[in-house]
Image: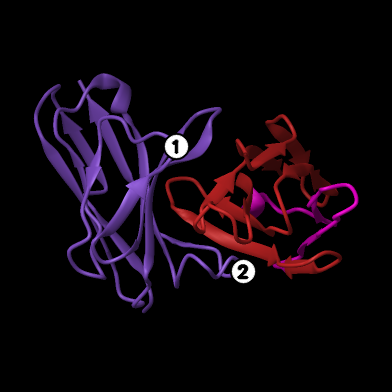
Amino acid sequence: GDSVTQMEGPVTLSEEAFLTINCTYTATGYPSLFWYVQYPGEGLQLLLKATKADDKGSNKGFEATYRKETTSFHLEKGSVQVSDSAVYFCALIAAGGTSYGKLTFGQGTILTVHP
Amino acid sequence: EAQVTQNPRYLITVTGKKLTVTCSQNMNHEYMSWYRQDPGLGLRQIYYSMNVEVTDKGDVPEGYKVSRKEKRNFPLILESPSPNQTSLYFCASSPHSGDSGYGYTFGSGTRLTVV
């Protein structure tokens, strides 16, 4: 079945450091890929997405590129801020098949940014 | 404002006492789904609905029921809650199951504690 694997957390960084959170996936066909963010005490918000190979999703300084050859969708940000502290989820929706639009999540990565 | 509304936000109940968590969306979305979030496990799908009167099991349906009598509402029912259902629950919606590129809109979550 479809699956998403994220790098082990938690991740702790100083403000203005470079961030990478690794994400790889297994799915049939060409899934759509997403990063969601969950701030403390809140629900999930869509951070960015990519729907086909080589697409780059970007938002709020975060970027991720859909790499079909490595089945990856790593999240990056050049300079993190304290306000970026949150839990980040990589996710996919498989195209077609019997998944019926199901959003499959990785286990989440906790990011803490210190001043 | 386009949104998914869940109620209640917090609930503490006792084992065996039936409860319902409500979910409503105002975007005319066809597809709705319930997830539970547990530490280290990410989000797992409980049930989903592709349209009115069309529901099906997700990955962890045991102990839960749902109904979809109206397009906007998708309540989650726990007939006899048990402590292992203590979790954070999210309702989500999407325009339709065939649109893999949209992603989901999530509610703010319901934190349920069963004692």
Q: Colour of chain B?
A: purple
The amino acid sitting under disc 1 is Asp
Is B49 above or below relative to B39? below
What segment is highlighted magenta in the picture?
A: A59-85
**Which percent across, then down, holds residue A39?**
52, 50
**Which percent across, then down, holds residue A100?**
49, 57
Q: In the structure shown, which secondary structural element does the residue marked by tag 1 occupy? A: loop
- Compare residues A40 and A114 and report the one nearer the observer: A40
Q: Which color mode does the image show?
A: by chain
Q: Which residue is mark 1?
A: B59
The amino acid sitting under disc 2 is Gly
**Where is residue B1, by image quadrant?**
bottom left
Please report the residue visible at 70 percent of the width from the left and 37 percent of the height from the top. Answer: A5
Subunit of mark 2?
B
The verdict on a common chain for dots 1 and 2 is yes
Q: Residue B101: which numbered mark, if any?
A: 2
Residue A70 shown in magenta: yes
The extreme front residue here reads A97
**Which percent across, then down, holds residue B102?**
56, 70
Is B114 above or below relative to B72? above
> Circle 2: is it few (<14), some (14-19), or many (20+) Cα within 10 Å?
many
Give me the chain that's red: A
Subunit of mark 1?
B
Q: Residue B49: which numbered mark, if any?
A: none
**Where is residue A113, by image quadrant?**
top right
> Circle 1: is it few (<14), some (14-19), or many (20+) Cα within 10 Å?
few
Label 1 – label 2 distance at C-alpha: 22 Å
Please report the residue visible at 71 percent of the width from the left and 67 percent of the height from the top. Answer: A51
- Dot 1 and dot 2 residues touching (CB under 8 Å): no
Residue B67 shown in magenta: no
The extreme left residue here reads B17
